[in-house]
Amino acid sequence: MRRRREALGAALVLVPWVALGARDAAHVDRITAAHEGIAGALAIVSALAAYFQEPHLDGAHRCPTAGEGDTGEVGPTPPLAVACAAGRGERCRAREAPTAAAEYPSALWHEAPLWRDLDYEITEPHAFHYALRTRNEGGACDFVVSAVADLDGDGEHSRIEVHGRLDGSGVMLDPTWRIDQPTE
């Protein structure tokens, strides 16, 4: 009987520490996933800068617009209906012929004119859904890159958003990135 009480006492002392450790591990996983979203947004900015620096048919520098107008928009890719948190390792995967949870057609990267113009796609497993808005204005390109993810499968999305401008002097990112994460 005494051993049972000692075991129960030890369990009562250890349970809160185990729970805190699990909560902290989940928090670390979310921070790691947020780093993925930031890196993905920066990769899109890099592809956009490379596209802008190339002179186009009329010799002008511009951002892609997927048409004849001055604005363009793509994403989120994959669509938010694809639940990355339901996939292996809580990640989405682009596949030629998707068959499992959180897989989506890799053609989404190639068929969307803005992604195609940027020669941008994600081939590795990822937690975020990416979107891009562009607007050409007076020899410059204004843009917004966003990354959203349901990092724990609860239906609430974390959002990372960066606004910027490309012109002859380079890339200027707004220093006030939007980084929203649901509270626990």
Image (cartoon, rainbow, N blue to C red):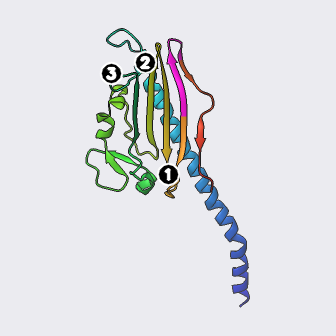
Question: Is residue 86 found left or right of 159 in the rendered image?
Answer: left
In front: 180, or 50? 180
Q: Which mark is residue 178?
A: none
Which region shows up in magenta?
162-170
Q: Secondary structure at mark 3?
A: loop
Mark 3 to mark 2 CA distance (whole Å): 16 Å
Identify the amino acid type marked 3.
Glu
Pointer 2 residue = 52
Residue furthest out toward the bottom: 1
In this rendering, the label closer to the viewer, 3 or 1: 3
Pointer 1 residue = 150
Q: Which circle's residue, 3 or 1, is located before the other in the chain?
A: 3
Q: Secondary structure at mark 2?
A: helix
State whether the magenta stretch is mostly helix, strand or loop.
Answer: strand
Pointer 3 residue = 68
Screen quadrant of the N terminus: bottom right
Q: Is residue 169 magenta?
A: yes
Q: Position of residue 145 (x, y in %)?
A: 49, 33
Question: Is residue 81 found left or right of 106 in the rendered image?
Answer: right
Identify the amino acid type marked 1.
Asp
Mark 3 to mark 1 CA distance (whole Å): 35 Å
Q: Residues within 10 Å of mark 3 (few under 14, many from 20)?
A: few
**Which residue is at 39% across, 11% downward?**
60
Please tell me whether residue 154 is drawn above or below residue 115 in the rendered image: below
- The picture quadrant where one finds residue 162 is top right
Q: Which circle's residue, 2 or 1, is located before the other in the chain?
A: 2
Q: Residues within 10 Å of mark 2 (few under 14, many from 20)?
A: many
